[in-house]
Image (tube, rainbow, N blue to C red):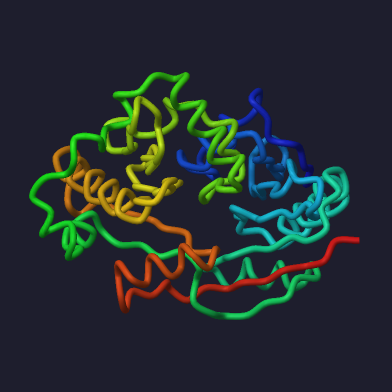
Amino acid sequence: MLDVEAIIDDNIEDYFSLLGKDVSEDMNREFYRAYGALEGDAPVGVIVYEICNADKEDEDVKSKIRLLKSDKDDALDLLHQTYKEEGAFGEDVKETSYWLEDEKLAASCEKAGFSKEFKENDTITITLGDAAGIDFVTKMKKVPDYIRSLEDISSEQYRMAIKDSLFSGRKGLVEDLGYLKKEWFENTVSACVITDDKVSGLFLIRITPSGIIEPVLLEASGPDSSKHMAFMIAFSIKKGMEKYPLASTIMIGRERKEIFALVDKLFPGVKGSDAFYGSRKEE
C-alpha cells in the first residue's frame, strides 16, 4: 500500500538514495520542501520543490520542482496530488514549473495538468578548463590587490555586503541569499572587492557535495563595477585552478536575461542540453 509523508530532518536519511547528496544538503535551505512516497516502509519516490518570491509582497508566490523521481506511476500520481493539495495550496503558490530530462517524469507532470515542451535548458554546464580559456582571463597576468578571497573578510562584512546587494534588488541565482551564511560558499574561490575598507563587490561560488561548481552571485557597485566583475571572475577562476581539477563541472543557471547575456558573451556558442519544461497555474 502506498503512503506519502513530508520529508523532514527526522526521516531525510531514509530518502538519501533517491535525493542524492546535493539535494539532501539543499533540504536544509529556507525554501526547499519535499514529499516522499512509501510502499510499506520502503521509500519509492520523491518530489522536491523550491518556493520562490516568498519574501516579496508585490509578486505572486511561485514554485519550482527541483527533483521528481520514482519508477512507479501510482507513486508519481500520489506525489503530484499531495504537492498540489498540500504543498502548493499550503504555500499559496500561484504557479509551478519544472525542468526534467526524463520523458516519463515529464509525462507524469503533463498528466497532472502541466504543460510540456522540449527545448533548450536554461542551465548550461562547462568545465573549469573551459572557464580558464576565457580570453581576458588568459591575458590577465595579475589581478589587482583589492580583489580578495571571501575568506579575507569577516562574517559581519559579508552580512553587510549581502544586505546591500539585496537592498539593490540583486539576489543572484538563489531565492535564499539573505539566509545563507558565509560558510555555505567556497571561501577561497569566492571573490570580493574591497574599496575604502568596504566590500563593494561579490562573486560567490558554491561547491556542492558532489563537487559541482555553482556561481551564485556576481555583483559590484560604483563606476568601475564592470571592470571589477571581470577582475573577480578572473580571480576566482585562477583560484579554482589551484584547488580543483580542470575537468570539474561548472553549472550556470541562465533564467535572467542579464545572466544569459553575460554567459553568452563569455562562452559563445555554448548551449544547454534539451530537456522538458512545463508549468501550471495553481488554483
On the image, the x and y values in percent for residue 32 come to 65, 40
Image quadrant in which you'd find residue 230:
bottom left
- Quadrant where the C terminus is found in the figure: bottom right
* Image location (x, y in percent) of residue 191: 31, 38
Left or right: residue 125 versus residue 15 is left
Q: How many numbered callouts?
A: 0
On the image, the x and y values in percent for residue 163 come to 57, 32
Question: Which of the pair 100/96 is nearer the observer?
Answer: 96
Which percent across, then down, holds residue 227? 30, 54
In the displayed structure, would residue 109 be above or below residue 221?
Answer: below
State the image quarter where residue 80 is shown: bottom right
Q: Quadrant of residue 138?
A: bottom left
Looking at the picture, tell me which residue is in the foreground, 276 or 129: 129
- Residue at the location (52% across, 73% down)? 275
Q: Residue at x 34, y 37 (%)?
A: 192
Q: Residue at x 73, y 41 (%)?
A: 55
Report the side of 222 relative to 61 (left or right). Answer: left
Foreground residue among 41 and 253: 253
The vertical placement of 248 against 21, above or below, is: below
Seen as rendered, the residue at the extreme right is 283
